[in-house]
Amino acid sequence: MDSINKLLTTAEDEYHDFKAQWYSKNDRAELIKDIFSFVNTSHHKDCYLIIGVNDNHEVVGVENDSNRLNTQKITDFLHSLPIANAHTPKIKVTPITVENHTVDVIVIKDTLDVPVYLDEDKRPKYANRPIHAGQIFARENDTNTPIDESASDYLVQRLWKKRFGLDLTIQQQYVSKLKDVNNWEYFEADKIGFLYNVDPDYCMFLEEDDENRYRVESYALGQFRARMDWQKLVLKYRNRTISEFLVVFLDGARFMTLTPNLGSINPLSDNLLTFQYFIADTLEYTVERLFLSMKQGPTAPDGLQKFNLFQRVVVFENKNQKDQVLDELSGKQDYIEEQCNPTQEEIDRCRSLLKMDFNVNTDLKLSEITGLKMYFFTGLNAVLYVVPCNLSCDMIYQKF
C-alpha cells in the first residue's frame, strides 16, 4: 500500500501508468497493448496500471465503472489470445481505497519471457482494431508503442538481451541459472560439485575446509545426529571464481546446507541473544534453495531434515525486513530470554543427542550451560513468539 501511495504522487514512467477509467469492450485492443507494453520492459521489476486516477494525479475512482474486470477475467482474456510460445503474462488486479474512492491496480509481473507478442492476427470481440502477428509493443520511459506500430529495433534488442540474461552482471546471471533447479546435477569425478547442464561454464565445486571450526551448532540439534562437517563451495564461471560459501554436512553427513548467518538482538548487551538466518533475495540463499530443491544425490535432504533445519533458522525476505524485525525485538530482550530458557526435557534431549557423536558429561546440569543456552536454543521460535513476521516454519517448508 505504501508503494502504491508513493506512485500516486510520481510522474508516469516505465514502471507505472494512470488511467481515469477502465477499458470498454471497444478498447480491448488497447488493453492488450498496454499490458504487453509493461511486460516488454527491459528492467526486472513489476509494473502497475493504476485505474481510477487521471493524468493530473487526481483520484476519480472506479466504484461506478461498469467495465471493471478482476484478475480472473483478465487472465482468461489473455489466455484466449494467440500469444507466441504461450508465454501468457501474469497479472493481478488489486482494489485499494484512496481518498474515499476505489482504485484498481493491475500488477503486471516481471518475466524473462520477453518479448511477448501474438503469432496470429487477433481482433478481440467488439474491439475497434486488431493486433497484428509479430507486432511488439514496449514501454520506454512514460510512453507505449502506438497501437498501429511496432517497437524499434533498439527496444526489441534490449528485450532479447533480458530474455537471455545478457543485460545482467555475472552474479545476477548466476542467480538466474541457479533458479533453473532441474538442470543442475551433482557429479563426482576428479572433483566433486554441481554442473549446470544447459551451460557447463557454470559449475560449483566442493573443496576441503582447513579451518578449525565448531563441530556442532544450534541448527544441527534438530537432526537425528548432531555432528557437522565443513567444506567450501566455490562458484565458478569458466575459470573465474564468482563467490565462495561455507557449507556443512548435517545429520551424520546425510545432507548439505549453506551455513546460516549469525545475527544478534541488542548486540551491545552483556547477555547476547543470537540467532541464525538467511536473506531470501541474495545469491547465497538462491544456492541454498537449489540444494533444498534437489531430489537425488548424496547432498539432497528429505522433507523432515528440511523441516527440522528451518525450525532453527530464520528466513527474512530482504535486509529491510531483517532490520525492521530486529528493531522491534530490541525492546523485548527480557521476554525473549524467558522464551529461550530450555526445559529439563530439552536439556536431556540435547545431552542424549550430543552423546552419540561427542564425549559429553552425562551429569550436565542447567547451571553448567547457562552461558550456552542462548547459543543452543535461541532461534526461529523465540523470534516468532514476539513478532508476527510471516516466517512460520510451515510457510518456509512449503516453499520447497
Image (cartoon, rainbow, N blue to C red):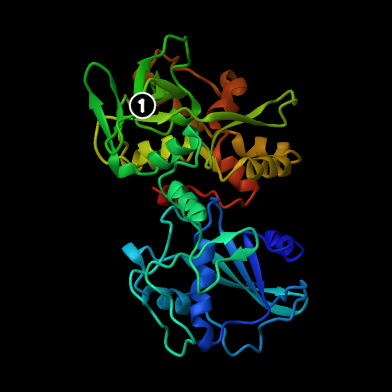
Q: Is residue 121 left or right of residue 21?
A: left
Give SS at disc 1.
strand
Q: Position of residue 280 (x, y in %)?
A: 52, 42
Mark 1, Cα crowd under 10 Å, few <14 / some 14-19 / many 20+, is many
- Residue displayed at 59% across by 43% down: 318
Which residue is under mark 1? 204
- Residue displayed at 61% across by 47% down: 385
Q: Amino acid at mark 1?
A: Met
Work out whether 126 lies above or below 161: below
Q: Is residue 167 left or right of residue 65?
A: left
Picture quadrant where residue 257 is located: top left
Q: Residue 309: in sight, yes or no?
A: no
Q: Is residue 69 left or right of residue 11?
A: left
Picture quadrant where residue 233 is located: top left
Q: Is residue 137 left or right of residue 61?
A: left
| Residue found at the far left of this picture | 189
Nearest the viewer among 146 and 25 is 146
Q: Residue 256: in sight, yes or no?
A: yes
- Residue displayed at 73% across by 38% down: 330
Q: Quadrant of the N terminus?
A: bottom right
Nearest the viewer among 206 and 151 is 151
Work out whether 72 lies above or below 87: below
Q: Position of residue 190 (x, y in %)?
A: 23, 16
Image label count:
1
Picture quadrant where residue 268 is located: top right
Work out whether 267 lies above or below 318: above
Nearest the viewer among 9 and 288 is 9
Q: Position of residue 141 (x, y in %)?
A: 64, 58
Q: Position of residue 250 (x, y in %)?
A: 37, 27
